[in-house]
Amino acid sequence: MPIQTSLRDNYTLRISVTSHCNLNCVYCNPVISKFEMSDDDLIKIIKAAALAGVKKISWTGGEPTVKKGLAEIIKTARELGIQKQSMTTNGVLFYKKAQELKNAGLTRVNISLDTLDAAEYKSITKRDALPYVLKSIETGINIFGKLKINHVVTRKNIHTIPQFIDFAQQYGDRLTIRFLELVPCNNASENDKKAFNAEFVSKDEIKETLKSFGKLSNYENTGDVPKSIYYKIDGKKGIFGINPNHSVNYRCDREKCPKIRVSPTGFVSNCTTNLKFCRNFKGIDQKQANELMEKIVREKETRNYKGFLHKQKYYDFWRFGVPPKNELKVD
């Protein structure tokens, strides 16, 4: 049976370009890796992916806007054949760099924001930076035409959902607000399950809150997260989504999972749920990288996905390069 090359057209290289972040959110607590890959290693990975038929990149971190020379890297990726490049950012610096990043080749932006109250924002992030984020939202919508806000819902901030619905009214369908379930994304969450459970808000409760504002109608999911659910609310402007990150372990499927994940330490995998598919690109030459990436992409196209469930088991590794104990050596 011939390979369905159309699958490659939809694959996204999701790159944690740095483990560094300029915030310290209470549910995240970023860990700075001592073993981040070089820019040369990063370009090598992008070139290999483009040669293998990958046409999209999603930039994340850490916080991608603190990465020095990111615009030049984005420009290089475009020149190598990457057609679409999106970014998830906390928005603290984005308003300063938005035009430069768009000129370089960035095509879409998501901004993470969990409250519209300045004191609450500082309590969550440990920085008094909400005005900069709001400026980034305005700037991003003006420059890119539309924008998505990612809002992690917890017990402490579930009361902010109505504020975000009101906030969307000034932008209409140019703004999508996506409410995310909390995931256990650091050692504290793993060590204290009771604390996580006390803060967790399920997709069903989020949906019931949205329904209290009007009848929901389904809206097409055109993003790279297959389990995201989007709605329009009768009588309200804006698009509203839910990411069931924790309560739904959707069954992996080669047509529906577009991600090829890249850690800030130079590891690449077509599957984030099982490290046996993870390969180290640090220190190899371009020819070796091209061959290895072709194997990764072909493996993604042809692997039997029966029985695979997507779980957020290695969240800290893919975002910050923190190696799972006794499973992987990073240095």
Image (cartoon, grey):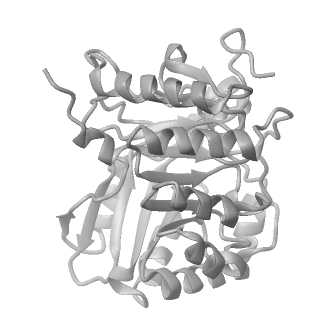
Q: Percent x, y for residue 184?
A: 59, 35
Q: Nearer the viewer, residue 64 or 83?
A: 83
Q: Percent x, y for residue 261?
A: 52, 36
Q: Nearer the viewer, residue 203 or 38?
A: 38
Q: Nearer the viewer, residue 174 or 183?
A: 174
Q: Residue at x 31, y 18 (%)?
A: 303
Q: Percent x, y for residue 155?
A: 56, 52
Q: Residue furthest left?
A: 1
Q: Residue at x 70, y 49 (%)?
A: 62
Q: Quadrant of the N terminus?
A: top left
Q: Residue furthest right?
A: 34
Count of picture labels: 0
Q: Residue at x 52, y 31 (%)?
A: 290
Q: Quadrant of the C terminus?
A: top right
Q: Is residue 74 above or below residue 254?
A: below
Q: Is residue 117 visible?
A: no
In-image side of 167 versus 211 (left or right): right
Q: Residue furthest front?
A: 287
Q: Is residue 298 above or below residue 212?
A: above
Q: Is residue 204 above or below residue 240?
A: above
Q: Is residue 152 visible?
A: yes
In-image side of 272 versus 191 (left or right): left
In-image side of 44 versus 251 (left or right): right
Q: Is residue 217 above or below residue 171?
A: above
